[in-house]
Amino acid sequence: MSPHLGHPFRGPHYAPGPPPAAPVAPSAPPAFSVTPASAAPVSPSSAAAPQAGVAAPPRAARRGRTLIASLALSIVAGGIAGAVTGSGDSESTAVELPQAAAPPAAAQGSISAAAASVLPGVVSVRAGRATGSGFAIDQQGHVVTNAHVVEGASDVSLVLSNGRTIDAEILGSDPDNDLAVLQVSTADAEGLRALTLGRSAQLRVGDPVLAVGSPLGLEGTVTAGIVSAVDRQARFGDNGTRQSAIQTDAAINPGNSGGPLVNAAGQVVGVNTAIATLGTSRSGNIGIGFAIPVDRMKTIVESLIN
């Protein structure tokens, strides 16, 4: 049974129902609502009592004036109620709620446009039994990924966005910062689109971001979220020291490691590296992921290449 919601709105046309079959008294119904029985009786005011030396008007005359006053009050109340409900008042002002103009076409498709511009530069990394993600940073065949993805691997291959598989070699690795650079041949590099590097120092909490990679081996997966924190201290890398990381609620799962975190303009702002867990056997996304800021990645990768 649904809960009681009270009485419906009683407007000027509300009808309380058919009159009782046998009226209790022949007198006219009161013009106002009945006073609750719990209210204290009200003594007549001095204005209502007849004054000395002044004859009280006949009962019929008083009743006539009472009816006229009641009728006038009903007309005024009906007019006010009609103005409130808008019934029968053809001159009332129409209400028009304001609406914002439609956003530009570029703003409507910003997320999909950013994903489309990034996907051709993202690869799935296969290193022995380990899998992860990576992305191209130039036209010379350099690909960035996480060091823990390729750690101890002798054979590394990349799956491009078009499904083609190519070989890669480990050019350099920095386990302490969990970054590695892979090298592919010039011929194979033609199938890669170098991604634009942004500036992580310009990130603000609340900025939209995309995590692109191959979670659980599902190549070309894009998830969206926001920047949850820009200077979160987290432990990752072989030395286990606290490092400044970007925190995001974009879904990051095993296999996303080494993939790019990009802003709404499709610029790389971080390298997805780690996720927070609850300390149980379940290691999936719980809405807290971490990425290496691109400003630090740029410095480390340049030293690995040079």
Image: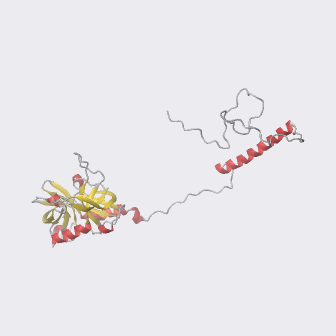
Colour treatment of the image: secondary structure
Using the image, determine if residue 68 lies above or below residue 224: above
Residue at image point 69% right, 38% down: 33
| Res 197 → quadrant | bottom left
Picture coordinates of residue 25, whole percent (x, y): 76, 29
Furthest residue to the top? 22
Left or right of 2 on screen, residue 45: right
Left or right of 114 on screen, residue 292: left
Residue at image point 40% right, 64% down: 107
Picture coordinates of residue 94, whole percent (x, y): 62, 56
Quadrant holding the C terminus: bottom left
Furthest residue to the front? 52
Picture coordinates of residue 181, whole percent (x, y): 17, 66
Residues 295 and 160: in front is: 295
Residues 137 and 62: in front is: 62
| Res 56 → quadrant | top right
Residue at image point 40% right, 65% down: 106
Furthest residue to the left? 154
Residues 145 and 229: in front is: 229
Residue 137 visible, this orientation: no
Using the image, determine if residue 16 lies above or below residue 268: above
Picture coordinates of residue 136, whole percent (x, y): 22, 66
